[in-house]
Every structure is written in structure tokens, then in C-alpha cells.
Image (cartoon, rainbow, N blue to C red):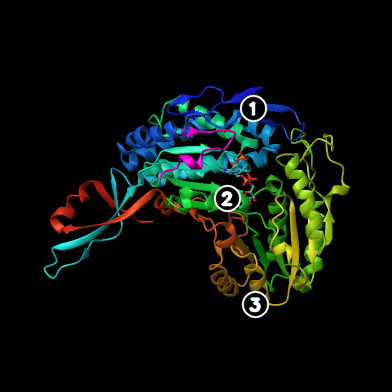
Amino acid sequence: MIHLPNYLSGVWQPDSGRSATLLDPVTGQPLATAGGPAAGLDAGFAFARAQGAAGLQALSYGQRASMLGEILKVLQANRDAYYDISLANSGTTKADSAVDIEGASFTLGYYAKTGAALGDARTLLDGAAAILSKDQLFQSQHILTPVRGVALFINAFNFPAWGLWEKAAPALLSGVPVIIKPATVTAWLTHRMVADVIAAGILPEGALSIVCGSSAGLLDALQPFDVLSFTGSADTAALIRSHAAISRHSVRANIEADSLNSSILGVDAAPGTAAFDLYVNELVREMTTKSGQRCTAIRRALVPQQFFDAVAEAVGAKLAQVSVGNPRHAEVRMGSLVGREQFDSVQAGIARLASEATVLYDGSAQALIDVDPAIAACAAPTLLGVRDADRAALVHDHEVFGPVSTLLGYRDTGHALSLAHRGLGSLVASVFSADSAWMAQVGRELAGTHGRVHMVSPDVGKTQTGHGNVMPASIHGGPGRAGGGEELGGLRALGFYHRRAALQGSSVTLQQLTPAATNWNV
Ligand code: NAP
């Protein structure tokens, strides 16, 4: 069994005691151990702030972008090992591992390419200079400079690969050193990727560090100019927000938390239409991809009341084709949840929602393939439903992080929108219809409470990127319950890792900036 040591101050640290054992969620077999409270955190953070930042910021944006390209090559060279780790530690099928691993590579590649457009620049200009004096000589130019600190990432268990690189790519491109703390239960994949990149010697010393296992002391090590990006549950997010680093010292924090995402079927999309079929396929894909363990998955499926039975029947028929069990078995389409604790939480969540909803499809009637049901964390898909959506409240409040969704019948467009808004802020909503004018209107209405609105008409049925897939060109995050964060969105992502300041002076002085500056065109 391997141990996952911390990498701080440019050195793999001695074992800090064992705090956790990582398991294979299908067989229950122990795989790796992670450490207890990390030693040397303050020194490790200081090393990153000094050495890591200096090394990165000695380079132009274009040079850092090509470093991302080099990292991508390392990840591609080792991808077979990553699939093996994902299978063993996350219990995912190859297709579900790909969502994480290929998603990470795609995002890195995207920032390598997009960042290259910034070329030799060492300073980012934010818009044109504003004239402040009558003679026009005294002006104000806004610029962006990398934050003078580290970026600490505290990540969730469900994306050990993508979760690291979707944050690290824009941070490193910005010139900001990264310290990653993966969720312990699936930390192995993150750890292996970090180890591979460090061994390849691509990054300056101190640019990338990792703490595995206990999170004790991590927030205490933060200083005012550091930034923190957290992905995980609303409960941990609340703890983090109340820590003095954030509440007193104004450490900039980005929070991605729970989200009760919805998907709306248009009134025009009757059974038999292309939009109806696209909706049914998407709902099934969202319920079963990574066993529903995606923060963006469809939790609330809003359908016109008159189509409620037809949707339930079509979705149930497709879910019945989904074989669940050991992802090593060729017939298995959906693997395991991340662990037994998550399994228990999903079962309790289904029971809670079922107190006010009907079970429309219960996959647990089918036998699991090639697993011991008493050990494996395999959960079958469950479709719940409430025909008159006004009779349900829990579904808008309780996120069941597994292959579970609830069908809700709506009366008219206003009713559908008010139901979507009851999620109190979500990462994504999708809309399926052939009526573009209606869909655009609904999209605009949803934009106030959602980070992303995914609109699918039959003309994009084959090319649309998927309700739950986070594309680096679009922002990821959402207001309210979803945490209020914002990531990705092309070069917009760099904003989090930069400080904006107004430089006021003679236009002659301000022009001294421009040879090594480029405008920040998002
Ligand atoms: P979690 O229990 O909140 O853990 C998230 C991270 O916080 C882990 O790395 C955890 O470390 C760490 N942590 C726990 N207590 C901490 C503390 N007191 N101080 C500092 N760090 C602490 O969440 P999870 O169970 O891993 O993830 C599931 C949740 O994440 C779901 O609710 C899902 O909706 C949400 N999620 C959101 C997004 C998004 O983008 N919005 C994406 C994925 C998941 P340990 O593992 O060592 O405890």
C-alpha cells in the first residue's frame, strides 16, 4: 500500500502520521494512506509565495502558457496510470474516468492555447486610459497584476483530476503558485498527477505543492494577499467563510458548493418530437454519468404536467438498460459511488425525498453485476416524481449526490421559472425546446439565478456539449446556494488571480507600461 506524502517547500515531506486509508469503493480493499496534520505549512506557504511566485513571474504570459502545454504532455504520457487509479479509487467505468481525466487535459490544452495569445506580455491592461485633467496629460490606466500570494485549492472528491487542473491552469497562467489539498478519499489521482509534473521539472520550484490528508492548519497558514478556491459541501463552505483568514483578513475566496440544478422541457416538446427525445437522453445521461456525482447534474427535471407520465415512462425504460456494478466487468455501464459513506448518504437522501415524492423508477430491483452488495458502494439509479410540483419542498433543498433525480410537473412558463428559482441559485439550468424565441426568453429569466443556461434545440441536438459538462470557455459557478463563485470562462478566469489597480500619472509615464503590456480582452 502506498503512502501519499505532502510536497511543500520544494521537498517531499517525511510521513506526518497516518490519518486516513483510501479504499477501492467496489471491493473495499485498502489502496493508500494519507497523512495527519501537515508539518511545515507556514514554511511551505512562505516558500511558494517567494520562490514559486518569483519563478513564475519571471516569465511572460506566453511562456507560462507553453508551460501548461508541457504539463499536458506529461499528463498524456501517463494517462493509462491515471485510468487505473481512477478505476481503483473512484470505482468509475472508463467512460466516467474520462470525464475527469480527459476533462483535465482538455482544460489545460484550452488555457495553453488561449494563454499563448497573450504573447510576451508581462502586464495586463484593463481597458483604455481615462483622461483626468483638462490638458489631457494626467490619466488613469487600470492594470491587472498577479496577486502577491499563493492560491490554495481545497477540492471535492468527485473530480480529482479536472478539479485540480481547471483551477491550476488559470492560476499558473496568471503567475500565481498553487497549493492543492484534494479531498482525502480520492486524493491518489491528484497526488500522482502532481508527482508526475514535479518529476518532469517543468515548473519553477515552489509553483506547485500538495497537502494530502488532514486539512488542519491550512486556513491558518493563509495571509491577506493569498486566494482560496474551495469546492465541496455547503457545510464545509460555511466553516471556511467564518475562518478569520476570510472574515477578518479579506483573503479572496471562491466557493463552489451544492447545487440543485434543473432542466426544463418546453411545452412545445411533446412526446414524439426531437426535443422530447433529447430531453430524455440528457436526463438519463446526467443521472448516470459518474453515478450522478457531478455538482452540475440534473436534480430537478421540470416537465409540463401533461407530459409527466410520458417522460417518466421514457426515462424509466432507458434507466432499465443501465447495468450497475463492478466497472471492471465489460457489461457494466455505471460503476460505484465514491465510498460506503456516500452510499449511505444517497440511500438516506432518497428516503427523505420519497417522503413527499413517488418512486417512478427504482433500479435497485436489478441485480448488481460482479460485486458484493454488502461491501460495494454501488447505487442503482432512482427516478422520483411529484406530478403537482407545489406539493414538494425538500426537492428544492436537499441535494442527493448520486444517480437520483426528481420529475416535477409544471403548469405554465411562469410556474416552471418559479420552480427553477426555488433552488436559490444553481450552477446550471437547461432548457429543451424547438421554440427558439421561448427558449431565449426563458434563458434570460434564468440567467439571474444561474451561472450557466444550456439551451438545446433540435438543430444542436448532436453538437451540444451536454448539460453537466463544464466547458473552459464558459463560466462555472453560480449565485446563492451554489456558493457565489465563478471559475473558467476563458481568460475571465484570470481575474480571480489578479489585483486590479488604477495607475494615475502623466500619459508619458503610463506609456512606459505598454511595451510589455497587452489589453485583457476576455
Ligand atoms: P466536503 O466534505 O465539503 O469536502 C471538500 C473539501 O474540504 C475536502 O478536500 C475536505 O478534506 C475539505 N475539508 C473538510 N473540512 C475542512 C475544514 N474544516 N477546513 C478545510 N478543509 C476542509 O465535500 P465533498 O464531500 O468532498 O464533496 C461533495 C460536495 O461537493 C457536494 O455537495 C457537491 O455538490 C459539491 N461539489 C460542488 C462542485 C462545484 O463546482 N460547485 C463540484 C464538485 C462537488 P477531506 O476530504 O480531507 O475531509
| Residue 414, numbered circle | 3
Residue found at x 60% / y 39%: 183
Residue found at x 68% / y 73%: 268
Q: Is residue 189 left or right of residue 71?
A: right
Could you tell me if the residues under marks 2 and 3 are in contact, i.e. CB atoms within 8 Å? Answer: no
Q: Quadrant of the N terminus?
A: top right
Q: Is residue 453 visible?
A: no
Query: Quarter for ligand 1?
Result: top right
Amino acid under label 3? Gly
Could you tell me if the residues under marks 2 and 1 are in contact, i.e. CB atoms within 8 Å? Answer: no
Q: Is residue 95 visible?
A: yes
Instruction: Please state the horizontal and vertical placement of residue 437, each as a whole percent of the image.
Output: 57, 74
Does mark 2's beta carbon lie closer than 8 Å to ligand 1? yes
Could you tell me if the residues under marks 3 and 1 are in contact, i.e. CB atoms within 8 Å? Answer: no
Amino acid under label 1? Thr
Q: Which residue is mark 1?
A: 33
Span of residues in magenta:
209-223
Residue reaching furthest to the left: 135
| Residue 239, numbered circle | 2
| Mark 2 neighbour class, 10 Å CA radius: few under 14, some 14 to 19, many 20 or more | few
Q: Quadrant of the C terminus?
A: bottom left
The secondary structure type at the circle numbered 1 is: strand
Does mark 1's beta carbon lie closer than 8 Å to ligand 1? no
Amino acid under label 2? Leu
Q: Earlier in the sequence, mark 3 or mark 1?
A: 1
Q: Earlier in the sequence, mark 2 or mark 1?
A: 1
Between label 2 and label 3, give the one nearer the viewer. Answer: 2
| Principal secondary structure, stretch drawn in magenta | loop
